[in-house]
Structure formats: C-alpha cells, structure tokens
Image (cartoon, helix red, strand yellow):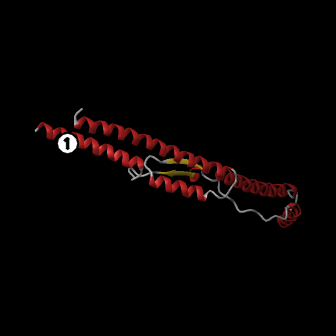
Amino acid sequence: MTKRMLFVLAAIVLGALGLYNLSQNNQTAHSLASEIVQVDSSNSPDTQSVTTDLKDFVKAHMGASVTYTLTGSYNRALAVAQASQAAQDSSTKLYADAQKACMGKTDSLTQARCNEAYIQAHQSSVPAASPVPTPKQSDYQVKLQSPLWTPDLAGALLLGSVVALVAGLLLGRRSRR
C-alpha cells in the first residue's frame, strides 16, 4: 500500500469518527433541551442552571445546534392572559347588567346614580386587573446555533481528516514528479 493511500485511508477514518462525534454532540444538545422543557413543564422556575449548561455546550461543540419551546412557561403565561381577559369580560358584563337594570330611568343623572349603585352593590372587592397581553409562542422558542467549527473532538477529527487528505494529495503529486 502506498503512502498516499494510507493518508487517504486515515482521512476517511478520521472523517467518519468526526461525523460520529458530530451526531453525539447533536444528541447531547437535544437531550439537554428536553431536560429544560421537562423542568419548565413541571412548574419549576429554576431552568437557569440547565439553560446555562446547554448554552455553554452549544458554544463549545460543533453540530450542537438546537431549537426548543418552553411550553410550560408559555402555558402559564397564556393562563394568566386568559384569566385577565375573563376578569375584564366579567367587568364588562357587570356594566352591561347595570345598564339593563337602570334602563327605565327617565333622567340621565338618576340613571347614572342607579348604574353606580348597581355596580357598587354587585362588584367584588377585588380591584380590577390590568389587561395582560396574550403571549406569543415565538417568544418562548429558544434557538441556539453552534459555531461552524470548534476545537472539540469532532472538530479535531474533521480537521485531521482534511489535513490527512491534503497530505495524501500532495504526496501523490511529489511522487509523480
């Protein structure tokens, strides 16, 4: 076997190992993202440590890009927005009921006093909630992009593959001269 073929063979082996490590990086990133989603779904507010671990992993490893959605946080924010909307709807209904109850009054001042008395009599002691906007699901999606090349094991193997391939090609040119 010639030296050139040995370098090409080494390039193929190193490339295959590098691609395998890329897939391992991807699997690790996805399992960390799944862990974050599970912690978030369990109403635990402490996703910060796991999120930091994932961000650090993605920054340092090739092929570790991942996108995930914090469905637990989104669902909680949506429930708050829906509760706020329900409170506003009940407040609107109370004003409509006051208008119906005081409709027969001839004088506008008398009707206004009637409306006020009706509202005070039927209004709960809870202060009116401020409106909460409906959350956008895209605000709860996290996309982490890994660098094109990093000096991790996968990056080193792929770089070694390229170097071995170039060395094999250059060695082949020298032997022909």
Residue 33 lies, in percent from the top left, at: 57, 48
Picture mark count = 1
Residue occupying image coordinates x 19% and y 42%: 170
Image spot of residue 121 (x, y percent): 89, 63
| Disc 1: CA contacts within 10 A as few (<14), some (14-19) or many (>=20) | few
Of residues 29 and 168, the one drawn nearer to the viewer in this rendering:
168
Query: Residue 66 appears at what percent x and percent y?
Result: 51, 47
Residue 67 visible within the image? yes
* Outermost residue toward the left in this view: 177
Q: Could you say which is closer to the camera, residue 150 or residue 89?
A: 150
Quarter placement of the C terminus: top left
Residue 12: which quarter of the image?
Answer: top left
Q: Secondary structure at mark 1?
A: helix
Kindly indicate the quadrant of the structure image that contains residue 158: top left
Q: Is residue 110 above or below residue 138?
A: below
Classify residue 102 as left or right of residue 39.
right
Q: Residue at x 71, y 52 (%)?
A: 79
Name the amino acid, label 1: Leu
Q: Which residue is mark 1?
A: 170
Residue drawn at (35%, 38%), measured in percent from left and top? 13
- Above or below 115: residue 35: above
Q: Is residue 70 visible?
A: no
Q: Position of residue 42 (x, y in %)?
A: 69, 51
Among all residues in the image, which is located at the extreme front?
A: 1
Of residues 128 and 77, the one nearer the viewer is 77
Quadrant location of the N terminus in the rendered image:
top left
Q: Is residue 62 left or right of residue 7?
A: right
